[in-house]
Image: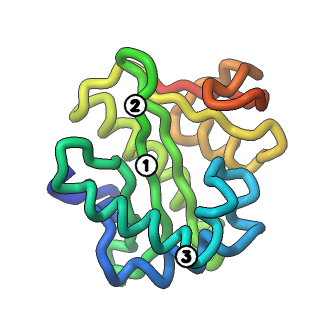
């Protein structure tokens, strides 16, 4: 993605150096990351900084990571981040996270709906999946509001953990 994706209130764009402090703040907050599948190393200051640096370096490579910052269009304030991970043919997995002080404003729903639509209309995927921890009631509600359909409990393809699978087609 070379150009930002613009929605009603938000701009989804490549990460920049100025995002490091906000990203590390989020990643080192155990409440914010308890439902995310990042490893413990990535939830440390050094690990989060390294992850963001590797992401930014990948953008101009042959294998760019599809992880992006999200900012408020009006204030340009960092409100969260999101990403896409290719899975089996025609399917991509979505991830979205909102800074603690920005929650409750509909940003997660706007991010999920905008990025899912982009994955289908611009990137050519047929399905966008959102595997969500069964205990994460807020994220499940976000997925439904964003247009994802509930496909029940299933096996996470990356682990032995059961997830609640939501699908956008």
| N-terminal-most mark, 3 or 1 | 3
- For the residues marked 2 and 3, what is the alpha-carbon distance in whole angstroms? 26 Å
Label for residue 83?
1
Residue 3 is at least partly visible in this image: yes
What residue is shown with label 3? 46
User: Image check: 7 left or right of 146?
Assistant: left
Q: CA distance from mark 3 to mark 1?
A: 21 Å
Indicate the position of residue 46 as horizontal and vertical percent values.
Answer: 55, 76
| Residue 25 picture location, percent across and down | 59, 79
Task: Give me the residue at 36% from left, 18% from top.
Answer: 90
Q: Are marks 1 and 2 in contact (CB under 8 Å)?
A: no
Q: Is residue 160 left or right of residue 75?
A: right
Count of residue discs: 3
Whole-percent x and y of residue 56? 30, 64
Residue 86 numbered mark, or none = 2
Cα distance in 3D space between marks 1 and 2: 10 Å
Pick the front one: 162 or 120: 162
- Check disc 3: other Cα within 10 Å, few if <14, some if 14-19, many if 20+: few
Picture quadrant where residue 13 is located: bottom left
Q: Earlier in the sequence, mark 2 or mark 3?
A: 3
Residue 105: x percent and y percent?
58, 67
Residue name at image x 43 percent, y 79 percent = 20
């Amino acid at each position: 993605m070379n150009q930002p994706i613009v929605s009603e209130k938000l701009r989804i764009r490549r990460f920049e150096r100025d995002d490091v402090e906000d990203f590390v703040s989020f990643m080192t907050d155990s409440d914010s990351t308890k439902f995310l599948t990042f490893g413990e190393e990535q939830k440390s200051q050094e690990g989060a900084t390294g992850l963001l640096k590797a992401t930014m370096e990948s953008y101009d490579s042959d294998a760019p990571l599809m992880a992006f910052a999200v900012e408020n269009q009006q204030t340009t304030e960092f409100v969260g981040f999101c990403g896409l991970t290719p899975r089996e043919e025609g399917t991509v997995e979505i991830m979205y996270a909102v800074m603690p002080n920005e929650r409750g404003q509909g940003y997660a729903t706007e991010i999920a709906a905008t990025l899912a639509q982009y994955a289908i209309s611009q990137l050519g995927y047929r399905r966008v999946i959102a595997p969500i921890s069964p205990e994460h009631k807020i994220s499940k509600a976000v997925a439904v509001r964003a247009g994802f359909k509930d496909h029940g409990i299933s096996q996470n393809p990356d682990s032995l953990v059961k997830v609640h699978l939501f699908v956008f087609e």
